[in-house]
Image (cartoon, rainbow, N blue to C red):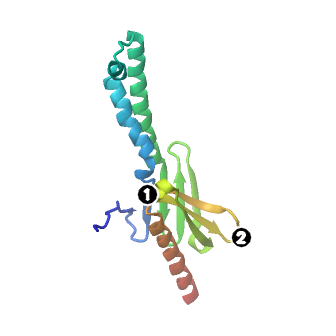
Amino acid sequence: MKKRRWPKPEHSSMSTSITYRVSHRALLGYWLLIPVGAALYAAPDAPFTLAGVTPAAPLTAALTWAGMGVAAWGLLNVAYQRLAHKYVIESDRVIERHGIIARRVTPLHIHHIRSTEVNQTIMGRLLGYGTVEMSAAGTGTSEARFDRVSRPMDVMAAIDGSVSNKASTAGGE
């Protein structure tokens, strides 16, 4: 059996920093809107022709605009999800960034992380993406979430490795 080749995370200029983004596979629904919308734009009367009916001109024009809108909606959602969500694991903290114009940044120091958890839907398991949640000491809720990242078990292992390294470094001082 041939081993799958997954896209590798982006490494920043610092060797101790790894950047993750929303997985392309998690955006499959939006990706599918692009060819569906383009097909509707290119041939708005095709469903009617297959049924043997001649559509009215205003209906054809409306379907052309609808096709363009559906394709644009899919493309804009893919671009927004990929550009607006950035997750960084550094040697001393993890950072969750959301937004393009308005921005929300959630840093969580490594020594505060007490547990990490991976959540995957059935589709996420099949396509290889999931959500990694980190909880801090004294809280019952997640403090930071890496939503829809590729290889969530590897992301969790990288976070746990950073936590272990930080704990061993702090214990050795």
Quarter of the image where the N terminus is located: bottom left
Residues at marks 2 and 1 touching, judged by CB atoms closer than 8 Å: no
State which tag comes first along the sequence, 2 or 1.
1
Q: Position of residue 93 (x, y in %)?
A: 54, 68
- Identify which amino acid the numbered label 1 is placed on: Leu
Query: Which residue is drawn at the image coordinates 34% and 19% (left, top)?
Result: 45
Q: CA distance from mark 2 to mark 1?
A: 34 Å
The residue wearing badge 1 is: 126
- Tell me if residue 83 comes above or below residue 155 in the rendering: above
**Number of callouts:** 2
- Extreme-bottom residue of the structure: 172
Q: Is residue 114 above or below residue 45?
A: below
Residues packed near mark 1 inside 10 Å, few (<14), some (14 to 19) or many (20 plus): few
Crowding around mark 2 (Cα neighbors within 10 Å: few <14, some 14 to 19, many 20+) is few
The image quadrant of residue 39 is: top left
Q: Residue furthest front?
A: 52
Seen in the image, is 47 located left or right of residue 99? left
Q: Residue at x 37, y 36 (%)?
A: 34
Residue in view at x 59 percent, y 61 percent: 144
Q: Which residue is mark 2?
A: 138
Is 58 drawn above or below residue 153 in the view shown? above
